Image: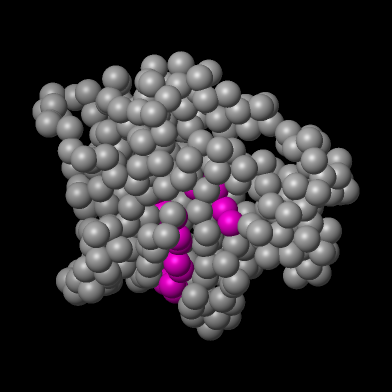
């Protein structure tokens, strides 16, 4: 059902005004990303991306964030559901989720261009508490990520946020205001229900998000489902159901991906060998680590790390 919905989203035709605004935003992103890669900015939470070539599938972790694509094409997969992203698309993640990502269209002449803005869920809750957001009946819980079509109402504050990069003296005062407007636009739009579900205190999605956050902070510890269920204030079977609905995997599968991605980062950045990285992230068996690493990343640990270094990639995920 979600796969079909994603395809319908991709088939919508934008207005000429929106197309012009996307091109303007693409121009601004390109101006601030002279080289390929991820470009952190002086605006808190804002990262700009320029990719100049297609990529193989690679595991990544999405934090609560908004990604606005304005050029190129990318494919994000979570639990068998594919989220196609092109120049018309926004990708909203309302909870930390491990995904498989692939750039499918990018070149030196027409690079993939995108901006990513991390979301402060405390700010989301504060805005959601305003009177204009009347309580709604809880809808069926969806995945922790979703795609939508970028609109003029959302593109305008995104463009103004990038303008601050040319006026850094205005960032301390205006950045928070513009980011709050972006959150407001998201909450008012079709994807707002995802944020509302996570932001609503006591809601099953919000409780599940607490379990997700705890697991991210404690992935190296042995997983005790009764302890995790206590964090979420749910029964174990209820937690399993809602955890899988939100992240497309069980708590154990989620922990495994976190461990493997953390181990990969330690090998790439800190220069650890495979056995040391495995034990640091909680594995007791190096052979089990090697098997599971190859299953996720496609080749054994040190061969994978060597290949990533040869291609100039020093980050575990993008």
Which quarter shows the C terminus? bottom right
The x, y position of residue 234, in whole percent, is: 37, 20
Picture residue at 53% right of the left edge, 18% below the top: 227
Count how many numbered circles sit on residues in the image.
Answer: 0
Asked whether, in this view, residue 226 is left or right of residue 37, the answer is left
Task: Determine whether 279 is above or below 186 in the image.
Answer: above
Which quarter shows the N terminus? bottom left
Which span is picked out in magenta? 59-78
Q: Main secondary structure of the magenta part?
A: strand
The x, y position of residue 316, in whole percent, is: 68, 53
Task: Determine whether 195 is above or below 6 in the image.
Answer: above
The x, y position of residue 240, in whole percent, is: 41, 34
Q: How is the image coloured?
A: one colour
Residue 287 shown in magenta: no
Asked whether, in this view, residue 226 is left or right of residue 92, the answer is right
The x, y position of residue 112, in whole percent, is: 49, 71
**Which residue is at the front of the view, 107 or 218?**
218
- Res. 53 visible in picture: yes
**Which residue is at the front of the view, 184 or 100?**
100
Task: Determine whether 192 is above or below 209 in the image.
Answer: below
Picture residue at 23% right of the left edge, 73% below the top: 11
- Res. 174 visible in picture: no
Picture residue at 31% right of the left edge, 67% below the top: 88
Picture residue at 59% right of the left edge, 50% below the top: 40
**Which residue is at the front of the view, 6 or 233?**
233
- Image quadrant in which you'd find residue 23: bottom left
Farthest front residue? 237
């Amino acid at each position: 059902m979600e796969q079909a919905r994603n395809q319908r989203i991709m088939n919508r035709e934008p207005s000429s005004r929106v197309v012009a605004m996307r091109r303007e935003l693409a121009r601004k992103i390109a101006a601030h990303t002279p080289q390929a890669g991820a470009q952190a900015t002086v605006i808190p939470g804002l990262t700009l991306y320029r990719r100049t070539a297609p990529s193989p599938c690679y595991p990544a972790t999405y934090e609560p964030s908004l990604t606005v694509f304005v050029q190129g094409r990318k494919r994000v997969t979570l639990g068998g559901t594919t989220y196609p992203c092109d120049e018309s698309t926004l990708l909203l993640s309302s909870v930390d989720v491990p995904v498989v990502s692939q750039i499918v269209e990018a070149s030196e002449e027409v690079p993939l261009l995108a901006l990513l803005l991390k979301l402060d869920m405390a700010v989301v809750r504060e805005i959601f508490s305003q009177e204009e957001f009347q309580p709604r009946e809880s809808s069926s819980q969806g995945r922790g990520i979703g795609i939508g079509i970028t609109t003029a109402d959302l593109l305008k504050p995104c463009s103004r946020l990038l303008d601050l990069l040319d006026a850094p003296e205005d960032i301390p005062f205006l950045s928070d205001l513009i980011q709050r407007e972006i959150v407001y636009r998201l909450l008012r739009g079709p994807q707002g229900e995802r944020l509302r579900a996570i932001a609503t205190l006591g809601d099953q999605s919000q409780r599940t998000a607490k379990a997700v956050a705890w697991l991210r902070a404690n992935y190296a510890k042995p997983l005790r489902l009764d302890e995790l269920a206590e964090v979420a204030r749910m029964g174990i079977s209820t937690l399993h159901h809602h955890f899988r609905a939100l992240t497309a995997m069980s708590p154990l599968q989620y922990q495994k991906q976190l461990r493997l991605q953390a181990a990969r980062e330690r090998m790439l950045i800190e220069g650890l060998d495979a056995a040391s990285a495995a034990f640091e992230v909680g594995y007791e068996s190096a052979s089990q680590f090697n098997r599971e690493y190859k299953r996720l990343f496609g080749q054994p640990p040190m061969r994978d790390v060597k290949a990533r270094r040869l291609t100039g990639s020093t980050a575990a995920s993008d």
